[in-house]
Image: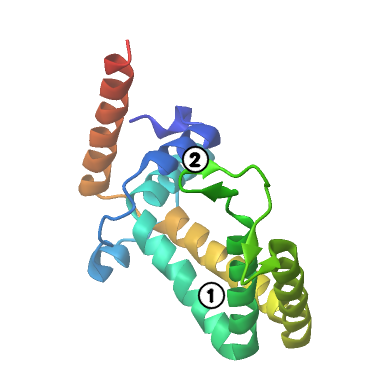
């Protein structure tokens, strides 16, 4: 595949269609053969190829760095869980037995949903502020993304990565062909 002609939007759309359940690549392969790219086009091609091929490894790397960031601020874990719970409270439609509810009001433990959303979001906001967790998460995300970009930039793609890329290109062409 000519990675020089792939746009960022194409890469993001392809990553949405990817099977993320594939196991990570071995660490011996992940940490072998680093070189500096010779030109901008080689760097761009290498970056896209490695991001696609080592996607599971990069995801685990970012999760590991975020986990280390949360270890520094344990109260931020509680804030993150409360934020997730608040989002979960907001993420449902009023449905009773598979049909939309006429009242359009959701109750949790006999109280309107907005009460729980307000309480949980307020507590999570206070915890994020008190624990300086948001700053920790942002630094951890920045470090994880920087490590990912650096690795993808300097890791020389091997034959397996190129063959895997060719296989995915063939699948994409076949998918477009079958839609006709």
Q: Residue at x 48, y 32 (%)?
A: 10
User: Which quarter of the rendering shows the N terminus?
Assistant: top left
Mark 2 or mark 1, earlier in chain: 2
Image quarter of residue 135 = bottom right
Q: Is residue 9 left or right of residue 4?
A: right
Q: Residue at x 50, y 79 (%)?
A: 67
Asked if the residue at tag 1 contacts the one at tag 2, i.e. Cβ–Cβ closer than 8 Å, the answer is no
Residue 13, percent from left and from top:
47, 36
For label 2, count other residues whose C-alpha is less than 10 Å away and answer few (under 14), some (14-19) or many (20+). Answer: few
Q: Secondary structure at mark 1?
A: helix
The residue where tag 2 is placed is 12
Q: How is colour applied across the structure in the image?
A: rainbow
Image quarter of residue 86 = bottom right
Residue 175, percent from left and from top:
29, 23
Gap in angstroms between the C-alphas marked 2 and 1: 22 Å
Q: Is residue 38 left or right of residue 137?
A: left
Looking at the image, which is closer to me, 80 or 108?
A: 108
For label 1, count other residues whose C-alpha is less than 10 Å away and answer few (under 14), some (14-19) or many (20+). Answer: many
Q: Residue at x 65, y 69 (%)?
A: 110
Give above or below for 88 relative to 129. above
Residue 57, percent from left and from top:
36, 63
Looking at the image, which is closer to me, 180 or 110?
A: 110
Image quarter of residue 108 = bottom right
Residue 151, percent from left and from top:
44, 61
Give above or below for 56 relative to 138. above
Give above or below for 137 relative to 131. above
Give above or below for 65 relative to 86. below
Decide if residue 164 is in sight here. Answer: yes
Taking the view exactly as shown, the residue that stands out farthest to the top is 180
The residue where tag 1 is placed is 66
Q: Residue at x 32, y 16 (%)?
A: 179
Looking at the image, which is closer to me, 5 or 138?
A: 138
């Amino acid at each position: 595949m000519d990675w020089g002609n792939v746009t960022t939007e194409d890469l993001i759309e392809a990553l949405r269609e990817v099977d993320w359940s594939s196991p990570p690549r071995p660490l011996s392969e992940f940490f072998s053969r680093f070189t500096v790219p010779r030109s901008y086009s080689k760097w761009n091609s290498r970056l896209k190829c490695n991001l696609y091929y080592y996607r599971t490894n990069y995801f685990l790397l970012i999760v590991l760095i975020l986990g280390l960031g949360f270890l520094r601020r344990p109260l931020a874990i509680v804030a993150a869980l409360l934020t997730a719970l608040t989002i979960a409270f907001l993420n449902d439609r009023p449905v009773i037995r598979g049909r939309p509810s006429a009242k359009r009001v959701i109750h949790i433990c006999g109280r309107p949903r907005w009460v729980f959303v307000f309480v949980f979001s307020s507590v999570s906001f206070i915890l994020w502020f008190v624990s300086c967790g948001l700053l920790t998460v942002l630094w951890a995300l920045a470090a994880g993304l920087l490590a990912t970009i650096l690795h993808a930039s300097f890791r020389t793609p091997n034959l397996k990565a190129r063959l895997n890329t060719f296989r995915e290109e063939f699948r994409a062409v076949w998918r477009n062909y079958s839609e006709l």
